[in-house]
Image (spheres, rainbow, N blue to C red):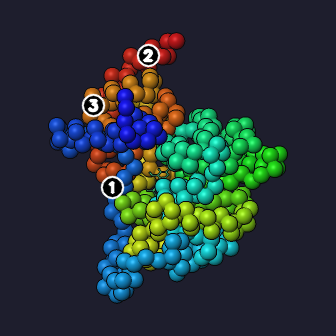
């Protein structure tokens, strides 16, 4: 059918995000049955408030700093003092050597990823991603006419297999996107895994005679449980670019605030930084939102209430294991990844009959699983567990038939 919008955007209208679709379905069901009767685990929108220091900082900044400064344009890379404070904190925390010039403030991790992909990609360049993965990566890569190459999933723990990563790299590979703690599996990649991946990248980069950049997408860096360490990637691999965000760590997803950190040792780091600042501008972000830049500078040592997420994690994991579901033990982020005994879309349809909304694994290029976002009120989990148990009963014949094969 004839249409006037671009082919690329038309394509996107035809495959609307499954996460968003479930979110809309949640609103529809809530209107029908009442919000208390819908168990909506579809979207990673933190349900815990930002720490009080955030609102205190907003109030103080608005009161004490000149309005034309707080609400004005600044350098496209962001405020120098904010970038300097971030660099200092990284250096204290990870023993790195960042200066303010290695940091660019961005509109969240999504803004950062777009800026860096625009900076790096020529049409036809390949970007490797590891399944299951945040499906927006595919759209971001396509924005710059790049090609997404998928590394197959590595069950049961979903930590990537370095050899499989190596096999996905070709002379056209410009970058690999990594995401740990991971959406959707909750996996945290160990230093051993990351060093293995770094070695695979080094080997292929030497073979092809060009660098392969590691883009570390880190909105969940602060959300790791049981004392799990989230290694800092520029220390494992020289050609690393980090895309950080406060969307989850300070519960500020609507404020659109994050940064890019380019390793000072990366090949052409100065040129990458110069180009990324221009990309921030020409993509139309111009600069990251001003007021919230000043706020995060005052809240660098704050974090969302990790114990609340941890409580939810245990409640949900134990409850679903008890009900007979096969779950990947979540070490980080706020997602539970569950194996389905049948087609994952069918599972989601069956779950919907119990007013449970979850996202099919196919929405993350990994069918046969579903994702449950537990960044919800704990009462939502408690209320949902009986519904999950009824769903398990519905699924009993499917399990029995599968086990009989
Ligand atoms: N990357 C991953 C893996 C995510 O899960 C999300 C958001 O859910 C983003 C990036 C985008 O985060 P932001 O809100 O910082 O743009």
* Cβ–Cβ under 8 Å for marks 1 and 2: no
Lateral position of residue 298 relative to residue 116, left or right: left
Residue assigned mark 1: 47
Please say whether residue 386 is visible from this viewpoint.
no
Considering depth in this image, is 125 or 169 the residue closer to the camera? Answer: 125
Between tags 1 and 2, which lies in front? Answer: 1
Residue assigned mark 3: 354
Which image quarter holds the N terminus? Answer: top left
Q: CA distance from mark 1 to mark 2?
A: 37 Å
Q: CA distance from mark 3 to mark 2?
A: 21 Å
- Mark 3 or 1, nearer chain start: 1
* Rendering coords of residue 67 (x, y %): 34, 83
Give neighbour class at mark 1: few <14, some 14-19, many 20+ (Cα, 10 Å). Answer: some
- Quarter-wise, where is residue 59 in the image? bottom left
- Checking the image for residue 129, the label placed there is none
* Rendering coords of residue 357 (x, y %): 32, 37
* Rendering coords of residue 74 (x, y %): 47, 77
Between tags 3 and 2, which lies in front? Answer: 3
- SS class, disc 2: helix
Residue assigned mark 2: 400
- SS class, disc 1: loop
* Rendering coords of residue 237 (x, y %): 72, 57
């Amino acid at each position: 059918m004839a249409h006037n919008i671009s082919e690329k955007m038309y394509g996107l209208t035809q495959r609307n995000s499954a996460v968003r679709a479930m979110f809309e379905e949640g609103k529809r069901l809530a209107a029908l049955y009442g919000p208390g009767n819908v168990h909506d685990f579809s979207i990673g929108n933190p349900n815990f408030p930002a720490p009080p220091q955030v609102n205190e900082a907003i109030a103080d900044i608005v009161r004490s700093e000149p309005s034309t400064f707080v609400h004005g344009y600044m350098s496209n890379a962001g405020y120098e003092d904010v970038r300097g404070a971030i660099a200092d904190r990284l250096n204290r925390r990870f023993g790195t050597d960042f200066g303010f010039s290695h940091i660019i403030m961005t509109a969240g991790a999504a803004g950062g990823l777009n800026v860096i992909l625009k900076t790096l990609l020529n049409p036809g360049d390949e970007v490797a991603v590891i399944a299951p993965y945040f499906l927006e990566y595919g759209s971001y890569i396509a924005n710059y006419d790049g090609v997404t190459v998928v590394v197959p999933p590595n069950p049961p723990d979903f930590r990537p297999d370095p050899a499989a990563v190596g096999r996905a790299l070709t002379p056209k590979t410009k970058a690999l996107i990594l995401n740990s703690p991971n959406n959707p599996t909750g996996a945290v990649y160990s230093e051993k895994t990351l060093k293995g991946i770094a070695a695979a990248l080094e080997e292929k980069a030497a073979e092809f005679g060009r660098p392969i950049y590691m883009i570390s997408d880190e909105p969940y860096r602060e959300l790791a449980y049981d004392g799990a360490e989230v290694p800092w990637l520029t220390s494992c691999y020289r050609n690393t670019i980090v895309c950080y965000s406060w969307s989850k760590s300070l519960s500020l997803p609507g404020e659109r605030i994050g940064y890019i950190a380019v390793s000072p040792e990366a090949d052409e780091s100065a040129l990458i930084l110069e180009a990324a600042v221009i990309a921030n501008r020409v993509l139309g972000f111009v600069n990251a939102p001003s007021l919230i830049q000043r706020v995060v500078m005052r809240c660098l040592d704050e974090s969302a209430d990790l114990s609340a997420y941890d409580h939810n994690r245990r409640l949900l994991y134990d409850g679903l294991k008890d009900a007979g579901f096969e779950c990947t033990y979540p070490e980080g982020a706020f997602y539970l990844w569950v194996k389905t005994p049948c087609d994952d879309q069918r599972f989601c349809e069956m779950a919907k009959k119990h007013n449970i909304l979850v996202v099919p694994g196919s929405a993350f290029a990994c069918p046969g699983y579903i994702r449950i976002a537990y960044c919800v009120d704990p009462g939502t989990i408690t209320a949902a567990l009986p519904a999950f148990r009824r769903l398990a009963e519905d699924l009993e014949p499917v399990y029995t038939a599968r086990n009989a094969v």
